[in-house]
Image: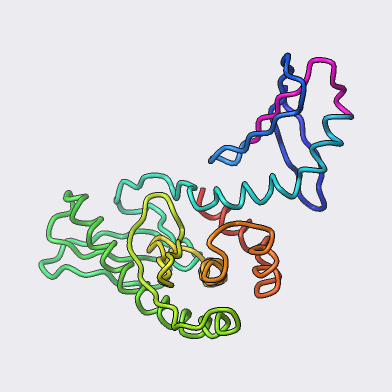
Amino acid sequence: MKDQIQYGNTLIDYNLEFTERKTLGIKVHPDKSVNVSAPEESSIEKIREKLKGKASWIIKQQDFFLSFHPLTPARKFVSGETHLYLGRQYRLKLHEDQSESVKLTGGYINVYTKDLLNKIGIQELLKQWYTEKAEQHFNLMFNELKPISKAFYELEPQLSYRWMKKRWGSCDKNGKIHLNLELIKTPKKCIEYVMVHELCHLKYLNHSNAFYTLLEKLYPDWKPTKDRLERLMV
Protein backbone atom coordinates (compact mmCIF):
# COMPACT_ATOMS: atom_id res chain seq x y z
CA MET A 1 0.00 0.00 0.00
CA LYS A 2 1.03 3.62 -0.50
CA ASP A 3 1.27 6.09 2.36
CA GLN A 4 3.08 9.31 3.27
CA ILE A 5 4.35 11.31 6.23
CA GLN A 6 4.89 15.03 6.72
CA TYR A 7 8.33 16.17 7.86
CA GLY A 8 8.56 19.94 8.13
CA ASN A 9 7.57 21.23 4.68
CA THR A 10 8.46 17.94 3.01
CA LEU A 11 6.07 15.11 2.12
CA ILE A 12 7.71 11.69 2.06
CA ASP A 13 5.80 9.11 0.02
CA TYR A 14 6.52 5.46 0.61
CA ASN A 15 5.37 1.98 -0.34
CA LEU A 16 4.42 -0.15 2.65
CA GLU A 17 4.27 -3.90 2.93
CA PHE A 18 3.70 -6.14 5.95
CA THR A 19 5.95 -9.15 6.40
CA GLU A 20 6.93 -11.68 9.06
CA ARG A 21 9.98 -9.64 10.03
CA LYS A 22 10.39 -8.42 13.61
CA THR A 23 11.65 -4.89 12.96
CA LEU A 24 10.90 -2.03 10.57
CA GLY A 25 12.99 -2.01 7.37
CA ILE A 26 13.50 1.08 5.18
CA LYS A 27 15.06 1.15 1.71
CA VAL A 28 15.65 4.32 -0.35
CA HIS A 29 16.21 3.62 -4.03
CA PRO A 30 18.11 5.63 -6.69
CA ASP A 31 14.80 6.87 -8.16
CA LYS A 32 14.13 8.35 -4.67
CA SER A 33 11.28 5.92 -3.98
CA VAL A 34 11.01 4.58 -0.44
CA ASN A 35 9.99 1.03 0.46
CA VAL A 36 9.05 0.15 4.02
CA SER A 37 8.70 -3.39 5.37
CA ALA A 38 6.89 -3.66 8.69
CA PRO A 39 5.99 -6.50 11.07
CA GLU A 40 2.50 -7.83 10.36
CA GLU A 41 1.07 -6.68 13.70
CA SER A 42 2.29 -3.06 13.30
CA SER A 43 -0.24 -0.22 13.27
CA ILE A 44 -0.08 2.56 10.68
CA GLU A 45 0.28 5.12 13.46
CA LYS A 46 3.29 3.32 14.92
CA ILE A 47 4.91 2.96 11.50
CA ARG A 48 4.45 6.66 10.76
CA GLU A 49 5.90 7.56 14.15
CA LYS A 50 9.02 5.49 13.50
CA LEU A 51 9.39 6.88 9.98
CA LYS A 52 9.26 10.44 11.27
CA GLY A 53 12.21 9.54 13.48
CA LYS A 54 14.07 8.42 10.35
CA ALA A 55 12.81 11.23 8.08
CA SER A 56 16.04 13.23 8.18
CA TRP A 57 18.02 10.15 7.12
CA ILE A 58 15.55 9.35 4.32
CA ILE A 59 15.80 12.89 2.90
CA LYS A 60 19.61 12.76 3.02
CA GLN A 61 19.57 9.46 1.13
CA GLN A 62 17.28 10.97 -1.49
CA ASP A 63 19.63 13.95 -1.77
CA PHE A 64 22.54 11.59 -2.33
CA PHE A 65 20.67 9.85 -5.13
CA LEU A 66 20.10 13.23 -6.80
CA SER A 67 23.54 12.61 -8.33
CA PHE A 68 22.08 9.69 -10.28
CA HIS A 69 18.92 11.27 -11.61
CA PRO A 70 18.16 10.98 -15.32
CA LEU A 71 18.14 14.30 -17.14
CA THR A 72 15.75 15.57 -19.76
CA PRO A 73 13.99 13.04 -22.02
CA ALA A 74 15.75 12.02 -25.23
CA ARG A 75 15.59 14.70 -27.90
CA LYS A 76 14.84 14.23 -31.60
CA PHE A 77 16.71 17.38 -32.75
CA VAL A 78 13.96 18.75 -34.98
CA SER A 79 12.73 22.32 -35.43
CA GLY A 80 10.25 23.40 -32.78
CA GLU A 81 11.64 21.12 -30.09
CA THR A 82 12.40 22.75 -26.72
CA HIS A 83 15.92 22.78 -25.27
CA LEU A 84 17.13 24.25 -21.98
CA TYR A 85 19.90 26.77 -21.48
CA LEU A 86 20.62 28.33 -18.06
CA GLY A 87 17.16 27.30 -16.87
CA ARG A 88 15.19 28.82 -19.73
CA GLN A 89 13.38 26.96 -22.50
CA TYR A 90 14.28 27.76 -26.09
CA ARG A 91 12.87 26.50 -29.36
CA LEU A 92 15.24 24.73 -31.69
CA LYS A 93 15.29 26.16 -35.21
CA LEU A 94 17.27 24.36 -37.93
CA HIS A 95 18.71 26.17 -40.95
CA GLU A 96 20.40 24.65 -43.98
CA ASP A 97 23.73 26.41 -44.44
CA GLN A 98 27.20 25.55 -45.72
CA SER A 99 28.74 27.23 -42.68
CA GLU A 100 27.85 25.22 -39.55
CA SER A 101 27.26 27.10 -36.29
CA VAL A 102 24.88 27.65 -33.38
CA LYS A 103 23.47 31.05 -32.41
CA LEU A 104 21.10 32.10 -29.63
CA THR A 105 18.66 34.77 -30.75
CA GLY A 106 15.46 35.71 -28.96
CA GLY A 107 13.68 32.57 -27.83
CA TYR A 108 15.47 30.33 -30.32
CA ILE A 109 18.60 28.22 -30.50
CA ASN A 110 19.44 28.44 -34.20
CA VAL A 111 21.48 25.58 -35.62
CA TYR A 112 23.04 26.11 -39.04
CA THR A 113 23.95 22.81 -40.65
CA LYS A 114 24.79 21.39 -44.07
CA ASP A 115 22.41 18.46 -43.59
CA LEU A 116 19.05 18.95 -41.86
CA LEU A 117 18.56 15.18 -41.67
CA ASN A 118 21.84 14.48 -39.92
CA LYS A 119 20.55 14.29 -36.34
CA ILE A 120 23.88 13.09 -34.94
CA GLY A 121 25.65 16.02 -36.56
CA ILE A 122 23.08 18.47 -35.19
CA GLN A 123 23.43 16.95 -31.74
CA GLU A 124 27.21 17.32 -31.88
CA LEU A 125 26.92 20.97 -32.94
CA LEU A 126 24.67 21.61 -29.95
CA LYS A 127 26.98 19.76 -27.55
CA GLN A 128 29.93 21.82 -28.78
CA TRP A 129 27.93 25.02 -28.26
CA TYR A 130 26.84 23.96 -24.77
CA THR A 131 30.45 23.07 -23.91
CA GLU A 132 31.69 26.50 -24.96
CA LYS A 133 29.00 28.20 -22.89
CA ALA A 134 29.75 25.95 -19.90
CA GLU A 135 33.46 26.75 -20.07
CA GLN A 136 32.62 30.44 -19.95
CA HIS A 137 30.11 30.30 -17.07
CA PHE A 138 31.57 27.45 -14.99
CA ASN A 139 35.05 28.96 -14.76
CA LEU A 140 33.74 32.39 -13.79
CA MET A 141 31.41 31.01 -11.14
CA PHE A 142 33.99 28.59 -9.73
CA ASN A 143 36.58 31.33 -9.34
CA GLU A 144 34.04 33.34 -7.36
CA LEU A 145 33.03 30.41 -5.13
CA LYS A 146 36.22 28.48 -4.45
CA PRO A 147 37.55 30.95 -1.79
CA ILE A 148 34.91 29.57 0.61
CA SER A 149 37.00 26.39 0.86
CA LYS A 150 40.03 28.21 2.31
CA ALA A 151 38.62 27.79 5.82
CA PHE A 152 38.84 23.99 5.62
CA TYR A 153 41.06 23.11 2.63
CA GLU A 154 44.67 24.22 2.28
CA LEU A 155 45.24 23.63 -1.44
CA GLU A 156 43.77 25.33 -4.49
CA PRO A 157 40.63 23.49 -5.70
CA GLN A 158 40.70 22.56 -9.39
CA LEU A 159 37.75 22.37 -11.78
CA SER A 160 37.08 20.05 -14.69
CA TYR A 161 33.91 19.27 -16.62
CA ARG A 162 32.67 16.65 -19.03
CA TRP A 163 29.45 15.03 -20.17
CA MET A 164 28.29 12.52 -17.56
CA LYS A 165 25.43 10.04 -17.67
CA LYS A 166 24.84 9.56 -13.96
CA ARG A 167 26.17 12.43 -11.87
CA TRP A 168 25.76 16.19 -11.56
CA GLY A 169 29.23 16.41 -10.13
CA SER A 170 31.88 14.73 -8.01
CA CYS A 171 34.95 15.53 -5.95
CA ASP A 172 38.00 13.30 -5.83
CA LYS A 173 40.54 12.86 -3.05
CA ASN A 174 43.05 15.01 -4.96
CA GLY A 175 40.86 18.09 -4.61
CA LYS A 176 39.52 18.22 -8.15
CA ILE A 177 35.87 19.12 -8.71
CA HIS A 178 34.23 17.45 -11.73
CA LEU A 179 31.00 18.93 -13.12
CA ASN A 180 28.52 17.49 -15.57
CA LEU A 181 28.24 19.72 -18.63
CA GLU A 182 24.48 19.09 -18.52
CA LEU A 183 24.39 21.66 -15.71
CA ILE A 184 24.70 24.45 -18.29
CA LYS A 185 21.04 23.73 -19.04
CA THR A 186 20.04 24.66 -15.47
CA PRO A 187 19.74 28.07 -13.75
CA LYS A 188 22.94 29.62 -12.42
CA LYS A 189 21.57 29.18 -8.90
CA CYS A 190 21.50 25.41 -9.43
CA ILE A 191 25.02 25.37 -10.86
CA GLU A 192 26.15 27.36 -7.83
CA TYR A 193 24.52 24.85 -5.47
CA VAL A 194 26.26 21.88 -7.10
CA MET A 195 29.61 23.68 -6.95
CA VAL A 196 29.22 24.44 -3.24
CA HIS A 197 28.04 20.88 -2.61
CA GLU A 198 31.19 19.50 -4.22
CA LEU A 199 33.45 22.03 -2.50
CA CYS A 200 32.11 20.74 0.83
CA HIS A 201 33.36 17.31 -0.21
CA LEU A 202 36.90 18.69 -0.05
CA LYS A 203 36.48 18.36 3.72
CA TYR A 204 34.07 15.42 3.90
CA LEU A 205 34.17 12.80 1.13
CA ASN A 206 30.79 11.45 2.24
CA HIS A 207 27.24 12.51 3.04
CA SER A 208 27.59 12.44 6.82
CA ASN A 209 25.86 14.75 9.29
CA ALA A 210 29.07 16.79 9.43
CA PHE A 211 28.93 17.25 5.65
CA TYR A 212 25.35 18.56 5.76
CA THR A 213 26.18 20.85 8.67
CA LEU A 214 28.93 22.44 6.57
CA LEU A 215 26.67 22.65 3.49
CA GLU A 216 23.93 24.29 5.57
CA LYS A 217 26.42 26.83 6.88
CA LEU A 218 27.84 27.72 3.47
CA TYR A 219 24.61 27.47 1.46
CA PRO A 220 21.56 27.86 3.75
CA ASP A 221 18.99 27.57 0.93
CA TRP A 222 20.46 24.40 -0.58
CA LYS A 223 17.25 22.39 -0.09
CA PRO A 224 14.90 24.58 -2.19
CA THR A 225 17.65 24.97 -4.80
CA LYS A 226 18.10 21.22 -4.98
CA ASP A 227 14.32 20.82 -5.35
CA ARG A 228 14.32 23.37 -8.16
CA LEU A 229 17.07 21.45 -9.93
CA GLU A 230 15.09 18.22 -9.66
CA ARG A 231 11.89 19.78 -11.02
CA LEU A 232 13.67 21.27 -14.03
CA MET A 233 15.40 18.11 -15.18
CA VAL A 234 12.68 15.49 -15.23
**155 w.r.t. 1: above or below:** below
Q: Residue at x 62, y 47 (%)?
A: 62
In the picture as drawn, the residue positioned furthest to the left comes out as 98
Q: Is residue 135 visible?
A: yes
User: What percent of the width, then of the height, locates residue 139?
Assistant: 40, 80
User: What percent of the width, then of the height, locates residue 4?
Assistant: 77, 35
Q: How is the rendered protein coloured?
A: rainbow
Query: Is 231 or 218 nearer to us in this picture?
Result: 218
Residue 55, quarter of the rendered image? top right
Query: Is 65 or 91 nearer to us in this picture?
Result: 65
Q: Residue at x 74, y 50 (%)?
A: 56
Q: Residue at x 51, y 67 (%)?
A: 198
Q: Is residue 190 visible?
A: no
Q: Which residues fall within the magenta stretch?
A: 34-45
Query: Is 195 or 203 nearer to us in this picture?
Result: 203
User: What percent of the width, then of the height, locates residue 29?
Assistant: 57, 37
User: What percent of the width, then of the height, locates residue 141?
Assistant: 48, 80
**96 w.r.t. 218: above or below:** above
**121 w.r.t. 216: above or below:** above
Q: Residue at x 31, y 69 (%)?
A: 131
Left or right, residue 51 beside residue 158: right
Residue 224, quarter of the rendered image? bottom right
Left or right, residue 106 beside residue 10: left
- Figure quadrant of the N terminus: top right
Left or right, residue 20 beside residue 131: right
